[in-house]
Amino acid sequence: MKEKKESSIMNIFVYLLIVILIILIILPPLTRVFFKESNTDTNINSSNGTNAVSSATALTCRREVTVGTMIYNVTITSNYGNNTLNKVTFTYEAPEVVDNTVIDNPVLTEMNAIRNSGLVEETTNGLSTIFTLTRDVKEANPTNTSLDTFFQPLDSQTTTLESLGYTCSTLTA
């Protein structure tokens, strides 16, 4: 009789343990559903405590530059978040065949000016040379104004680049 009593107590304990485990599994999803944060418009990035980007705009400006028998494709992409310029990317795509008879190449002169500004990070990918200028680097070097032409508010940036012969388009998310 004692064994039967111990067995039934053990069974009750096992069933109770199963019920507790089921509650612990179901409880977290239910609390997320019923106690959802009421202010979902303001997302806070926990890593740096700043508000997340609520609007993003990319300004992409392109032009073809003919130098002798070569055609260079130049693209400038400006990324804006909450109407603040965060990054400018200059992409210079060189032709597959280089004309060595050209003495004064304005594209190479422009690339050297950007390179020599000391504000950009340069990467090369096949025939493309990519320069990246970030807001953090620009703010850390306020006296270096060499690339201010390319670091402006959206409307000014569009006007400036179109006056330099670029065809611009915007994409807003």
Image (cartoon, rainbow, N blue to C red):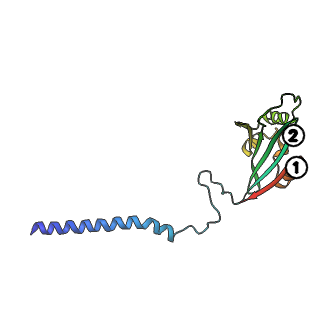
Q: Position of residue 129 (x, y in %)?
A: 74, 37
From the viewer's perspective, tell me whether residue 137 is left or right of residue 103: left
Q: CA distance from mark 1 to mark 2?
A: 21 Å
| In the image, farthest residue toward the right | 163
Q: Is residue 113 above or below residue 139?
A: above
Tag shown at residue 14: none
The residue at the point 88 percent across, 50 percent down is 162
Tag shown at residue 160: 1
Of the numbered discs 1 and 2, the one sitting upstream in the chain is: 2
Q: Where is residue 121, by image quadrant? A: top right
Disc 1 on helix, strand or loop?
helix
Disc 2 on helix, strand or loop?
strand
Q: Nearer the viewer, residue 74 or 160?
A: 74
Q: Position of residue 117 (x, y in %)?
A: 80, 35
Tag shown at residue 66: 2
The residue at the point 54 percent across, 68 percent down is 36
From the image, state whether disc 1 or disc 2 is nearer to you.
Answer: 2
Q: Position of residue 79 (x, y in %)?
A: 74, 51
Q: Is residue 162 above or below residue 92?
A: below
Categorize mark 2 by other alpha carbons within 10 Å: few (<14), some (14-19), many (20+).
few
Q: Amino acid at mark 2?
A: Thr
Quarter of the image that includes the N terminus: bottom left
| In the image, farthest residue toward the bottom | 34
Q: Nearer the viewer, residue 58 or 70?
A: 70
Q: Nearer the viewer, residue 56 or 65?
A: 65
The residue at the point 88 percent across, 28 percent down is 103
Q: Where is residue 18, by image quadrant? A: bottom left
